Each structure stands twice: as C-alpha cells, then as structure tokens.
Amino acid sequence: MVSAEQDPAARAFAAKVVESYSAELQRFLRRRVYDAQDLGDLVQEVYLRLLRVQNIETVRNPLAYIYGIAGHVASEFNMRQRQGRMVFDSTVVESLTENPESPQFVEGGGFFERQVGDALAQLPANRLAVLLLERREGLCHAEIAARLGLSVHTVKKYSVEALAHVRASLER
C-alpha cells in the first residue's frame, strides 16, 4: 500500500492547493502567529497535512479545507509557543489573588484567548472558514458564498453554527 506522502495524487493535490492559495494561506497564518519567521514552517506543516488526506476527491472546497488545516496548525503552534514561554512569577500571582477584579485575572492573562482558540480549533473546516472570512476579512455572506462556492443560506447557517459553538465553549 502506498502511503499518502508517496501517493502521486495526494502530492499533486497538496501542491496545487498550496500553490493556488499561497497568498491566502500566508495572510491567514500571518494573522495568527507572533513572528513572521515561523510562517515557512507553518506552511510546510499545512502542506504535510494535505499530503495525508486519504480521499482527496471528497474535498469539495480546497480553500475552506486549507483554512481549517491552517487554523489547527496555527492553534497548535501557538499553544506550544505559550507552553515554552510560561514563567512562574510569584509577585504577579500574589497581586492577582489579592485583587481578583484585576483585568489580568478576569481575562485570565491570555486564558480567554486560549478558550477562543480552542473553540475555533474544534470547528469543522467549512464553518471555521466562513467565520474567519466574515469576522477577520470583513466579507459579507454573499462574498463568502462566492469565494467558497456555497449558497448564501449555507454561509448564514455555518456562521450561526460557528458563533453558537464558540459562545457555548466560552460558557463552560
């Protein structure tokens, strides 16, 4: 049996998707990482994950699919980066416990961002793509529908479902 990395169809699919949507992928990832020097590594990871797609014929919307993969890659990368940078500062901990109304404590010093990131990482690729195009790119439902090859009704549905999922995740 040929592995996905060895499969010529998977290689051609991954190369075509990354080449076709390179600018969008770069822009998408650039907004999600602190250091632009990490972009090359993240694009490569997206490419490697595309190589592992088992049934490329089931991918109907490559842009939405690549946004989904890139969202997961960026989220995982940022999580690893945060874990590597964590430093225990007892004076900060003491001040936060003495003043629980402090904005740092209320927001969790990044806790809210992690919750949102985790909620977004759980979204299916198509819902994530719709939400990101709507919220980050500022596109209207008709523009998103045209870009992703979906109906306006489906875009509205995905947007509502994505927002409901994120809100529900934040309420936990």
Image: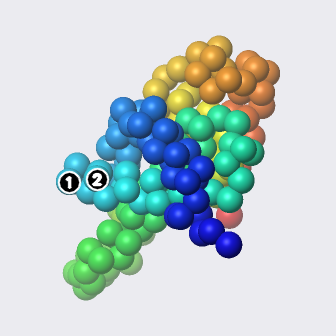
- Report the amino acid beneath label 2: Gly
Residue occupied by mark 1: 37
| Residue 5: % across, % down | 52, 64
Q: Which quarter of the rendering shows the C terminus?
A: bottom right
Q: Is residue 94 above or below residue 112?
A: below
**How is this picture coloured?**
rainbow
At 76% from the left and 20% from the top, the residue drawn is: 151
Q: 30 or 10, which is in the foreground?
A: 10
- The residue drawn where x is 53% and y is 30% is 133
Q: Is residue 119 left or right of residue 161?
A: left
Circles 1 and 2 in contact, beta carbons < 8 Å: yes
Residue labelled with disc 2: 40
Residue 124, how many percent across, how many down?
68, 49
Mark pair 1, 2: CA separation? 7 Å
The one nearer the camera, 73 or 96, is 73
For numbered disc 1, what is the local secondary structure?
helix
- Can you say whether 73 is above or below 139 in the image? below
Q: Quadrant of residue 159?
A: top right
Relative height, residue 124 to residue 114 (above, below): above
Viewer-nearest residue: 51 or 29: 51
Q: How many marks?
A: 2
Q: Position of residue 45 (x, y in %)?
A: 42, 60
Packing grade of label 2 (10 A; few <14, some 14-19, many >=20) is few
Left or right, residue 56 beside residue 6: right
Q: Residue 100 shows which numbered tag?
A: none
